[in-house]
Amino acid sequence: MNFPSSKKLKYWAENYLKGTISQSDKEALEAWYMSMPDMEIDWDDDQIDSLQTLQHKIFKAVESQIRDNDNKKILRRKRLRYIMSAAAIIFILVTLGFFMHKGKNTEIASAGRQLVNDIQPGITQATLTLPNGKKIALDSAHSVKITAEKGSIYVVDKNGVTTYLGNATQLNVYNTLTTHRGEQAPPLVLADGTKVWLNSASSLRFPISFNSDTREVTLSGEAYFEVAKNPRHPFIVNAGASKIKVLGTHFDVMAYKDEPYTCATLLEGSIRITNGNNNARLVPGQQGKISTDGSVNVGWVDAEESIAWLHGQLSMKSMNLTTFMREVSRWYNVDVVYEGEPPVLNFSGLLNKAVPLSQILAALSANGVRCNLKDKTIIVSGK
């Protein structure tokens, strides 16, 4: 068969990940894999070594096709870029559990030794703490909606049935929505109509009603906001020492304490970031990073990547290993420790958050990172 380009493979892989791949493309992708020379893979003995062998096999196939299709001298840089693209494809497909042991049609998720203590992905769950200290458990069947007229708070279930929880129209009365590691909150609608989605290991402190000149909330962790427009009452997100000021817009704020910077990414509208005497105004498609020294750096990004978590995916675009492992730690509720210096790797692509932890670790192993899971701790080392 004709060897597909790396661009085509990446396109197929991403659609496979999203579940939008057509039947013809799926068959072509599987046919490409099955067309490679036969080789024995001993899944039962060592799944990690099998993945490394499979990766090596695909690299060889890519290199062979380059030689066959290009009679001119191949520049090392071009060759490396092509092979690294293939590596990214392998990472995506292995994490999907796509690769099969020929003749057995066995997905990697079920092939070889299963992890006895495999860890399942996070769930939709959060805790709402009311001003009187009462805690309300929320899950995927419930969202939170605050009525603007009377400052009343309700829990609304998926059938639209509301349960009245209380009333507080006075100033300085706050609720707190909290997620632990392994949790992602159901949608929150504030009193002004602003919608908020809270990521793992995060908290949002907000008033039952906005009765001042500004609409202010306090965030720790990460959240995506769709702010209701109200030019007379700016919406302000307090994230550590930083303030993100908006009138009406869609944006993501990442302010985890274990990250080296606070990050705001704008998808629609306009926001202003302030930290001490430093400030910057963002336009859609820009991201502002506030470092620990207070400096604000602005750059262009793929803004949709910043909210991949909202759509059930983990983004790895231009992400190093330690940053990615912090994402894994928060979503799978595990600790991560390193034996020696962390391997230097940069990833790209999107991963499905719904897969068990074992598939994430298998994908890392295929890319040269050895991970051992002991209880709820991942021990990371280079191969």
Image (cartoon, rainbow, N blue to C red):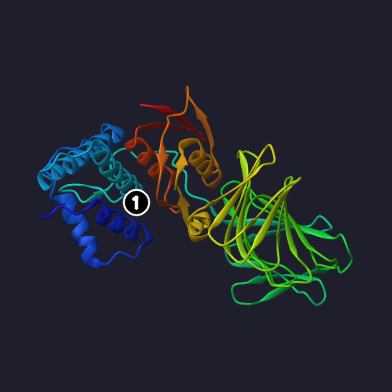
Q: Residue at x 15, y 37 (%)?
A: 40
Q: Which residue is at the front of the view, 267 or 169?
A: 267
Residue 206 visible in image: no
SS for tag 1? helix
Q: Quick one: quadrant of the C terminus? A: top left
Q: Is residue 225 left or right of residue 73?
A: right
Q: Is residue 168 left or right of residue 164?
A: right
Residue type, label 1: Leu
In the figure, is residue 22 to the left or right of 33?
right
Q: Position of residue 272 (x, y in %)?
A: 68, 57
Observer-nearest residue: 290 or 20? 290
Task: Give how far across and how far down residue 52 sits, in percent.
Answer: 27, 35
Quadrant of res 261:
top right
Above or below, 3 relative to 167 = above
Judging by the rendered image, the residue that carries numbered circle 1 is: 96
Q: Using the rendered image of the protein, determine whether residue 355 is visible from the camera's viewpoint.
A: yes
